[in-house]
Amino acid sequence: MAHKTDVVVIGGGSIGLNAAYYLQQTGRHVTLIDQGNIGIGSSSGNAGHIVPSHIVPLAAPGMVWQTIKWLLTPSKSPFSMRFSLDPDYISFLLRFSMSCTEENVRRSLIPLKNLGLLSSVEFARVISEEGLDCNYNQSGLLFLYKTKSAWEGGKHEAELLHQNNMPAEILDRDQVRQREPLSDDSVIGGVHFTGDSSLNPGKYLAAIKQRVATQGAVMVENTAVTGLETVNGKITKLVTSQGEFSPEEVVFAAGSWTPILAKKVGIPLPIQPAKGYSLTIKAGDRVPSQALLLGEKRVAITPLGDQIRVTGRLELSSLNTDVDQKKVDGIASAVCDYLKINRNWETLDTWAGLRPTTPDGLPIIERSAAVSNLVIAAGHAMLGLSLGPATGLLVSQLVNGTQPIIDLTGFRSSRF
C-alpha cells in the first residue's frame, strides 16, 4: 500500500534541499528522496561560489570555436567531451551550437541576473537567521589573468555587468597585489566581482539538511525511484526501493538524473551531465583572502578556513562520478602558476561531481504543462549551489500556487 504524502522532492542536492527548506517554511510536509546520501551530491564538493555576476550563459558567441581549440589541445584544456552516437547527446550538441549566439545572451541576461541576485540575498538572509556555520565570505570573487587577451575578455565582461548595474572593478597588476597578496608576479591584472561571495558547500548543505530534518521532513536516503504512475495527467504513485508513495505534489530536482525521471512521465528534457573535479588541500598559512578564479585555466579557488578548495574542468560525460587523478593533478598544477603557494601541501580530499547542463545555459524551473502536480527544477550546470536558495523559494511558490517572485518565462522547457 502506498504511503500518502504531501510533497515529495526527488533529489537531495542543493536544489532539492533548498526546495524542501522553503516548502516547509510555508507549512508543507516534505518527503525528500535521494538515490544516495542527502546533501552529499554534485554540489557538496564544488567551489562554493555564490555568483550573481554570472549573467552570461555558457552558450555564448565564440564558444563553439573555443571548444574546438580546447579539444585540439587536451593536455592544456579545461574542457573535454565524450564521443557517442546517442541521439539525445547528438541533439544536445546541435542545440548547444545553435544557442551560441548574441541573441541567446541577450535573452538570458535578465533571467540569470534576477535569479542570481535573488539567490545572493536569500543566502545572506538564511545564513544570518539560521546562524549557519559554513565559512561564508562576502569579499567577492577575484579573477586573475596572466595574458593580455584573457584580461581583455575579463574587462569586456566587467563592462557588460556595468551596463546591467552590477558591480565589477578592473584591477591593474599593483591593485591585484593589494587585493590578493598571494597572487604570483606573473599575474598582470584582474577583475573583482565585488557582489559575489563564497562558502563551504558541504557545511552549508549539511546545515540545511539538519534544519529540514528538524522541521519534520521525512528523509529517504539511498533509495532509487524505479517507477512513476500517472492517471489523467497527474502523478499518483512513486515506486521506490523502499516502498510506494502517493503524493499530492512532486518536485523533480535530481540534477543530471532528472531527464530519466521525466522520461518516465513522457517529458523530454535536454539535459546532459558535465563532470567537474575538485581537491581540498591544507596549505598552512598560505590561504587566499577571498574566492578566486584563475582566468585562463578556468580553475576556481575557495578559502575554507585553514583549507583551500580547488575546482575545475567541464567534461560532457556519462552518469558516473569516478575520479580521474590525472585530471585532478592538472587542476592542482594551476594553483602554483597563479599563487605563491608551494606544492608541498596536504591533500585532504578529491572529488568529482556532475553538473546538469542545458543547451542554452539556463536552468529549467517550471510547473509542468503536461503533468498537473509536477514541478521541475534542474539544469543549473555549474550554478546549482549558487542558484539553490532562489530556486528553492521559486519551487515553493510554484507548488503552493502563488505568484513567483521573479518572471520564470525564460526558464520554461517549452523554449527547446
Image (tube, rainbow, N blue to C red):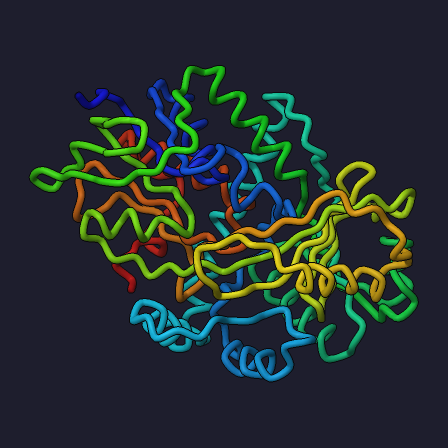
In the displayed structure image, the side of residue 60 where residue 180 appears, left or right: right
Return the x and y of residue 190 as percentages of the image width and height.
Answer: 78, 64
Q: Quadrant of residue 414?
A: bottom left
Residue drawn at x 68%, y 49% as measured from the top left: 350
Q: How many marks?
A: 0
Return the x and y of residue 240 as percentages of the image width and height.
Answer: 28, 33
Indicate whether 133 appears above or below 258: above
Q: Quadrant of residue 117?
A: top right
In the displayed structure image, the side of residue 132 where residue 267 appears, left or right: left
47 and 282: which is toward the camera: 282
Return the x and y of residue 186 as percentages of the image width and height.
Answer: 88, 71
| Residue at the left extreme, as displayed | 232
Residue drawn at x 50%, y 37% as measured from the top left: 389
Residue drawn at x 17%, y 48% as measured from the top left: 370
Indicate whether 374 appears above or below 362: above
12 and 416: which is toward the camera: 12
Q: The C terminus lies in which quarter of the figure?
A: bottom left
In the displayed structure image, the side of residue 68 where residue 48 appears, left or right: right
Indicate whether 291 appears above or below 244: below
Residue drawn at x 77%, y 64% as measured from the top left: 334
Q: The N terminus lies in which quarter of the figure?
A: top left
Q: Quadrant of residue 94?
A: bottom left
161 and 372: which is toward the camera: 372
Return the x and y of residue 223 as percentages of the image width and height.
Answer: 37, 33
